[in-house]
Amino acid sequence: MSFRLRAARASDLEPLYEMAKLTGGGFTNLPADRKALGGKLERAEDAFANTADELVDEQFVLVLEHAETGAIRGTCQLMTQVGQQWPFYSYRLNTLTQYSQELDRTVRAELLSLVTDLEGSSEVGGLFLHPNERAGGLGLLLARSRYLFIAMHRTRFADRVLAELRGIIDERGGSPFWDGVAGRFFGMSFQDADYFNAINGNQFIADLMPKHPVYIAMLDDDARSVIGVPHPTGRAAMRMLENEGFRYEGYVDIFDGGPTMIAPTDSVKSVAESSELTISDVDCQEGERAILACGKLSDFRACYGARTINADGSIAVDSAAADLLDVKTGDKVWSVTR
């Protein structure tokens, strides 16, 4: 497989824009807007250039590249500390229990409360794979390589990491959740609000959104039925997140009601089980399938490969992976079993 993940560059703007047009909306981290995408690439360039080992508000963008043709066929992002430039809003599902002594009746009402509980967390997001490449485990490579990047730059990330999954979008490109909740207060369609948020941030939510809890029983059936439900294309991503140790804890996106998954960073499977070893040789013939990564910051690269971990703690990798990563005997490589 001739694909590898690498740090994004300014020259990747056009292929990222072309992929953004394929998302179908509701994909805030990958807007189909050249100016916004260019801004993300500029932020990523600054983050890759920063060599200080400290947690600050940064954004890294990675791209999936076909090594032989140079074609960009996927992308993902890492945000180190959300909620620093503007508030990071979520809805939190909770239950209010009330008891009437006169009626001898207990009533439990589910509520959506606007919160900023997740501020300061790191976030993995913006994962998109070109529709023509959704085979051969490339989505898994995109997803799990992010965690290797975190492990390799651990001090640049918070102790909690989240992932927002896109919620239900109907055939018109609208959101039943938005129509039933926030849309009633903004006079904007979901597409308009989602685009505005992607370009300008969500401060307008703070300005206009009612701060009182929303009683779920007062929403229409369409809005209630999609709370915490991922878009059909995101179900596999949700399973991958669960396999990594992420859990849904009642937080949902304020726009489309999609679930937010959360995990302690050091408990994420691909972070906890990854390790850095010295390459003993680059001609591994029958090793186990693994994700291999090397390089700091802008030199980061990751790909699939075969590995054998030797008794002395060194690692043998296959020649194809060594070529993709541009490594040789004596170099260091991080890996985690596929």
Image (cartoon, rainbow, N blue to C red):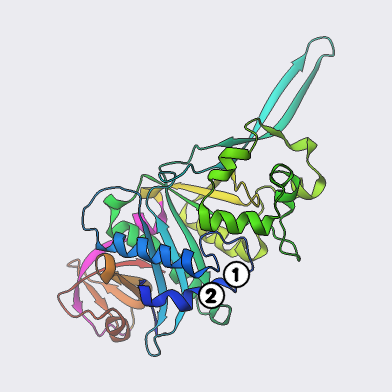
Residue farthest right in this picture: 103
For the point 67% across and 63% down, the residue is 232
Residue farthest bottom in this picture: 68
> Which quadrant would the N terminus be assigned to in this image?
bottom left
Residue 121 x, y percent position in the rendering: 42, 45
Residue 266 x, y percent position in the rendering: 36, 49
**Which is nearer the eye, 120 or 229?**
120
Q: Quadrant of residue 316?
A: bottom left
Residue 134 x, y percent position in the rendering: 56, 77
**Amino acid residing under circle 2:** Met
Q: Which residue is mark 2?
A: 19
Task: Note whether residue 144 is visible.
Answer: no
Q: Please give the count of numbered marks on the rendered protein.
A: 2
Q: Which residue is mark 1?
A: 23
Q: Is residue 161 above or below residue 291?
A: above
For the point 22% across and 79% down, the residue is 327
What residue range appears in magenta? Answer: 268-285
Tell whether position 269 is magenta: yes
For the point 51% across and 60% down, the residue is 29
Secondary structure beneath dot 1 equals loop
What distance separates the C-alpha of mark 2 from that of mark 1? 7 Å
**Which is nearer the eye, 7 or 262?**
7
Secondary structure beneath dot 2 equals helix
Tell whether position 201 is magenta: no
Say the numbered circle drawn on residue 10: none
Residue farthest top in this picture: 102
Q: Is residue 190 above or below residue 88?
A: below
**Which is nearer the eye, 149 or 212?**
212
**Which is nearer the eye, 266 or 48?**
48
**Amino acid residing under circle 1:** Thr
- Say whether marks 2 and 1 touch (CB < 8 Å): yes
